[in-house]
Image (tube, helix red, strand yellow):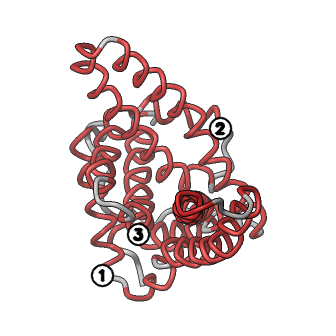
Amino acid sequence: MANPLANVPPPAARPGFGAGLKAFFGGIAFVARNPSVWPLAIVPALLAAVLTTALAVAGVSWLPGWVAGIIGPPQGTLGSVLGWLAQIAAAVLAVVVAFVIGFGLAQPLSGPVLERLVRRVEATLGAPTWPPTSTMVDVARSLQTVVVGYAFALPALATLFVIGLIFPPAMVVTVPLKVLVTALMLAWDACDYPLSIRGVSVGTRVAFMKRNAGAMVGFGAALVVVGFVPCLLLLVLPCGVAGATRLIHDIERFEGRQTR
């Protein structure tokens, strides 16, 4: 059966900020309306939960005892109280570190699943079928996505933080810039999946993002709003990838029309 979406004419104008916002909510709608992709969509959050729990249990089982061994036997009541507080602090630290590592690893480890989701979305859009890749290649590409995004965003965010700390009135400018940098980083995270599956280089992907900055900022702005709710961002990441796939498809159809 022919796919009716394949006959939709390409956009008359380059997708911009509004199209980016719309694409994000389109991704949510796609996942919500297709129960067959729900098992794929839950994987990043499930991986994060499993990794965080395992690391937290291991850390809480080991770190407080290690700290107690360093401190040595308590000397008097005050020593006992301080030793007890140090072990509690160590347990809290173990949980925090487990949370950071668990959530940090969940996205790259979910790379194969997210790329399968991209292929499912593109199939509904009538897009070309890209050559299959191995699980290791998918994980490596997902890890590359995270590394490139953070290599750009973290130095920029750190610089803006220092400027605001040294000269507080500058926060009128640095805070909006932080939001902009974060939006671009999150847009890169989601949009790089449908771009990398095409086998294009990092430089080509960066150029694509720059060429379509308005759409990327709009798409990333929606993800920034979601990110204000703790842990929700990873849960909606598959929706973001689905929406990014639709956005990339529209941009490519527009650019293909311009080159004719």
User: In the image, is residue 64 above or below residue 151?
Assistant: below
In this figure, which residue is indicated by the disc labeled 3? 235
Q: Is residue 259 visible?
A: yes
Residue at 59% x, 58% y is 79
Q: Are marks 1 and 2 in contact (CB under 8 Å)?
A: no
Residue 119 position in % (x across, y down): 54, 69
Q: Secondary structure at mark 1?
A: helix
Residue 7 position in % (x across, y down): 34, 64
Q: Which quadrant would the N terminus be assigned to in this image?
A: bottom left
User: In the image, is residue 11 above or below residue 211?
Assistant: below
Horizontal arrangement in the rendering, residue 159 relative to residue 195 (left or right): left
Q: Amino acid at mark 2?
A: Val
Q: Nearer the viewer, mark 2 or mark 3?
A: 3
In this figure, which residue is indicated by the disc labeled 2? 202
Q: Secondary structure at mark 2?
A: helix
- Tell me which corner region of the image, top left, top right, bottom left or bottom right, holds residue 56: bottom right
Residue 38 position in % (x across, y down): 43, 83
Residue at 33% x, 54% y is 227
User: In the image, is residue 179 above or below residue 84?
Assistant: above
Q: Amino acid at mark 1?
A: Arg
Could you tell which of marks 1 and 2 lies nearer the N-terminus? 1
Numbered label attached to residue 33: 1
- The CA span between labels 2 and 3 is 26 Å
Residue at 55% x, 67% y is 114
Residue at 57% x, 61% y is 107
Pick whichever, 104 or 62, lies toward us.
62
Q: Secondary structure at mark 3?
A: helix
Pick whichever, 51 or 22, lies toward us.
51
- The CA span between labels 3 and 1 is 17 Å
